[in-house]
Amino acid sequence: MFKAIGKQIKIIWSQIVTLWLVFLHLFKKADTVEYPDVQPYMFPRWRGRIVLTRDPDGEERCVACNLCAVACPVDCIALQKTEDENGRWYPEFFRINFSRCIMCGFCEEACPTHAIQLTPDFEMAEYVRQDMVWEKEHMLINGTGKYHDYNFYRVAGKAIGGKGKGEARNELPPVDRRSLLP
Amino acid sequence: MVSITIDGKNFEVDEDNNLLQECLSHAMDLPYFCWHPSMGSVGSCRQCAVIEYADDNDEKGRLVMACMTSPREGGRYSLKGARKFRAQAIESIMINHPHDCPVCEEGGECHLQDMTVMSGHAYRRYDGKKKTHNNQYLGPFINHEMNRCITCYRCVRYYKDYAGGTDFSVQASHDNTYFGRWQEGAYESEFSGNLVEVCPTGVFTDKPFAKNYVRKWDLQTSPSVCTGCGVGCNTNPGERYGTLRRIVNRFNDEVNGYFLCDKGRFGAGYVNSEQRIPVSMTRDSHEADPVQIEPDAAKQALKDAAKGAIGIASPRASMEANFALRELVGEDSFYAGISAKELGMLNSIIDIYQNRPVNIANIKDIENSDAVLILGEDITNTAARMALAVRQSVKNLGRQMGADLNFPNWHDAAIRTLAMDRKSPLYILSPHATRLDDVAKSVHISSAAQSARIGLAIAHAIDNSAPAVKGLSKEEQSLVDEIAGTLKGAKQALIISGTSSMEPALLEAAANVATALNDGDSKANLALAVPESNSLGLALMMQGNEKALEQAMSSGSKKAIVLENDLYRRAASADVDTFIDGLEQLAVLDSLKNRTGEQANLVLAAATFAESSGTFVNYEGRAQHYYSTFKAVDSIRSSVSWLSDKSLNELNAECAAALPHCAELTHLTPGEGYNFAGLKAPRQPHRYSGRTAMRANINVHEPKQEQDENGVMVYSMEGVPAIKDASVFNSPWAPGWNSNQSVFKFQEFAGGPLKQGNQGKRLLENNVKDKPWYEPEIAGDSDNGFKVFPIYHLFGSEELSAFTPAIQEKATSAYIALNPADAEKLGLHSTDGVQVEHNGAVPFILRNSIAAGTVGVAVGLSGLNFRNIPGSIALDKAEDWQSPDNWKAANIIVSDRSAESGKGSAS
Ligand code: SF4
Ligand code: SF4
Ligand code: SF4
Ligand code: SF4
Ligand code: FES
């Protein structure tokens, strides 16, 4: 009998404590911010809106290798490779369906050229879902993004306009196939 | 069979195969580059190293190359022990390799990528400078990116040793080796496209595909059959975003094996052609402008048009489509759509295959023959894959010499060195030099009729109960005796002929020779080439009636439905004009614009092979099913669905029931109920990307998956890739093996037939014991004018592939070929044109092999209708001659070109 009464008292006491603690919070500093009037600080490596960057020469970095598309777990990247008159590969179109994107960043990790990068911008809500389908012209920025130095075509062996065979980094001039000397 | 131990495990292996092959066959992943199942081993890449122990006490063992090792009874080997060596080997291979994968067309199906990962070489340690190479222009089919070469030598071994090409070689020395042509320019070999698959790296890649490139994992593919000729090679077309991107080989042990010809690989671009008919059109009269008509209305219009109409079928339409037409118009009004002569010859092939004691030779049988006689068929241009097989057959003598000395069959370099230039005999009878002459024991230039006589005489010389031939020259008689003796002495003789010469007696002569060689238990091989992908199927459909195009055109009917057929390629232009002018209603179903379609009142936009399913019957009477690769837009429908309300499967079953010999047609696919664990076979690879974005620009809500017409495969990545049925065997893939080399995972043993068997079912077999003879009447050659024989071009003569831009680049406009002496008599100079009787003027070339008084006329090329030309014609120098823009004499690759000829070329 006393046991049961003791239990009831314990319960009531605990509720009083809880109410007291909630009351105390009225005088604490708020954890939430007045978004959107107050903007939160976003870390540079936050995984938000995706951009396509340019190499240090100002050319499109994406070479349309399709690795981001295949790494994407929700398959929301579609693109088509094309090339310019000198053989440089680039995407004819590059589309991300952001209504499907889960901001996992796998595409950025897969990208061998640092073209595709996630940014701290998370404000991507739209009233119409169709507006969440972005094309290359919506994503291509004018800078190098987070990685400033890398230029894939300066390393690759494929010749492009302005870089012939043997002119990439760490390459010897082309061999003379008519010579038998080693 | 011998028993060996590999890393402590026991295996029963075939001692005739090499150790690499056996390791692969037993599901071990042993990396390799230079070995190829069809080309054997040379041991040059050092990638397949394993440890071999001398005996049970040997602790250390020694390094051997598995591909150069015959497994020996009780042998003890280790793959693990040589792992480090293999990693080092690939590291040194990769020292000069460019940093190209993202922009390399091989990436994602690169054997080098696979082997690098498999060997455990992940990080570059070498920081010296890389060797580089300049690339070459190699024609419209193939890209060159020499930097990516790992000097495995597969390409030269394929191009020169296997395919007999002469314009490609290895150059320079040491580690500067360069694989290319002496000078830039298009490859001459008709089989160059296989380099794309033979080269384990991205040095040689498919050029038209590269222009419009996507990764292998993004291609929707299906098991398909080539529409290029009557051989029926198995192909694997790939599609992305609604366009056909490329064709690769699909392994079929009995048909194409690992290789296609360049027409098959590069000739399907017509599917994306600007000449495609995108929508159905109708018009009231010949003069009115056609107006677009909605699909359902078009189908109704066709139904209305069918009342009282005759149906003209096609040798390039599927069995089901032709049968649907027959159902629609009724059997009495159903005509073949090919000339009576061609139909007669196809019928006689069916008769021979059924009623003569011969073995109908598939491509593998051709490769395994050790004495070959080709009677008047230029197979390099009419049935190219056969020619590649004949090139292999001449190597059988070398293999036999090797076997006598106990050399294993796969020991390629040893056998080649042993054989030197000794070859199994190949005899060719032809009106002109052919591309196989370099491996022939003798080439005899004679007209088709004369070749038939010689053929009959050979049969008589082998078996004197065969009808004899009189009037052969002494030289011909001694050739007859030589060939008869050789064929008789052969273990497995092969006779090849075909329909292209339009000489029926030639087929019968070939049949007589093969019959004569039958000695009770062994049958001679016989292969008779047919012109188109479903020629023989069409003939099977016409069994028992003689209704060819001539009969259709003289039937007096006022209404006609033409199925996938340009009549102007089948009959003389004037006759077709008269026929069409006499019609009140002409309905045409076709995929590409042509002269027949231009005159139709109703044109229905038909699907190509890539957008529809069906059955083709190849030259050996093998019925093969092809699955649609992708769904066309709604306005384009398969001929079957235009012509009939029944499903493809229903038509297939009815066709099988209604036609003689065709019962097997229903067994070509696993059927509507097919599933594996409740799932159908997918067309898309399991890593197909972009599904939720590829159509998102049109509508962000993804559409429902398209439904398939025959219920076996789905347009989706969901499902189980078919393991159970060869007909559903799609693009091969296995963990760690992303390139086409992964096909060995599905074979009985590496390089052997597929575990599920070979696709297709033979419709024709014979069990004849006696030896019936043909006694053809061979008309004497007329003495007026030049005697005409047809010349075919792999690139350009075939109707559909000729719409493909890459093929057009390799083709030329129509021309005639003359003997230099005749040209001089006609007073022709190299820049002149020739006025051809019944036709316009065309350019000419001079060929030394052509007999005086005969003229070769190109078939199917633009600028001339061969069907206008009678057996002999008069030739004259053309007035005011200017060669046409698409006259490209340099594209005519023949060995007997007179130096004087073809200078009038535009390019
Ligand atoms: S991975 Fe990078 S380079 Fe490749 S397609 Fe994607 S964005 Fe372009
Ligand atoms: S050949 Fe293979 S490994 Fe080399 S660049 Fe191409 S994809 Fe990469
Ligand atoms: S080009 Fe290709 S096949 Fe030829 S040696 Fe180089 S890697 Fe091997
Ligand atoms: S041989 Fe004929 S069927 Fe085979 S790939 Fe060539 S064109 Fe196609
Ligand atoms: S595969 Fe054995 S050495 Fe190349």
Image: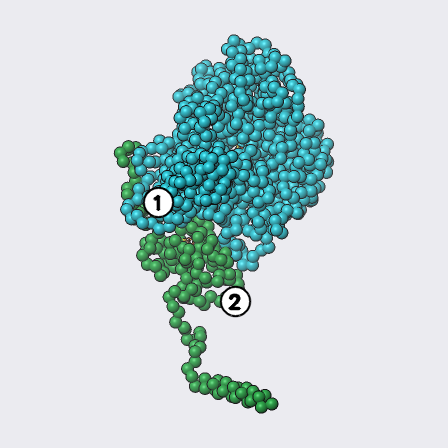
- The image quarter in which residue B671 lies: top right
Chain of the residue displaying label 2: A
Give the drawing colour for chain A: green
Q: Residue at x 48, y 84 (%)?
A: A22
- The image quarter in which residue B619 lies: top right
Name the one closer to the observer, B123 or B89.
B89
The residue under label 1 is: B88
Vertical side of A129 occupied by B232: above or below = above
Q: Residue at x 64, y 46 (%)?
A: B674
- Category of crowding for the residue at label 1, using alpha-carbon neighbours closer than 10 angstroms: few (below 14), some (14–19), many (at least 20): some
The spot of residue B495 in percent (x, y) is: 56, 22
The residue under label 2 is: A127
Residue at mark 1 shares a chain with residue at mark 2: no
Residue B890 in view, yes or no: no
Name the one closer to the observer, B78 or B84.
B78
The spot of residue B407 in percent (x, y) is: 44, 28
- The image quarter in which residue B521 lies: top right
Horizontal arrangement in the rendering, residue B189 relative to residue B302 (left or right):
left
Residue B747 in view, yes or no: yes
Chain the render paints cyan: B
Chain of the residue displaying label 1: B
Mark 1: which secondary structure? helix
Vertical side of B814 occupied by B479: above or below = above
Name the one closer to the observer, B590 or B544.
B544
The spot of residue B175 in percent (x, y) is: 31, 37
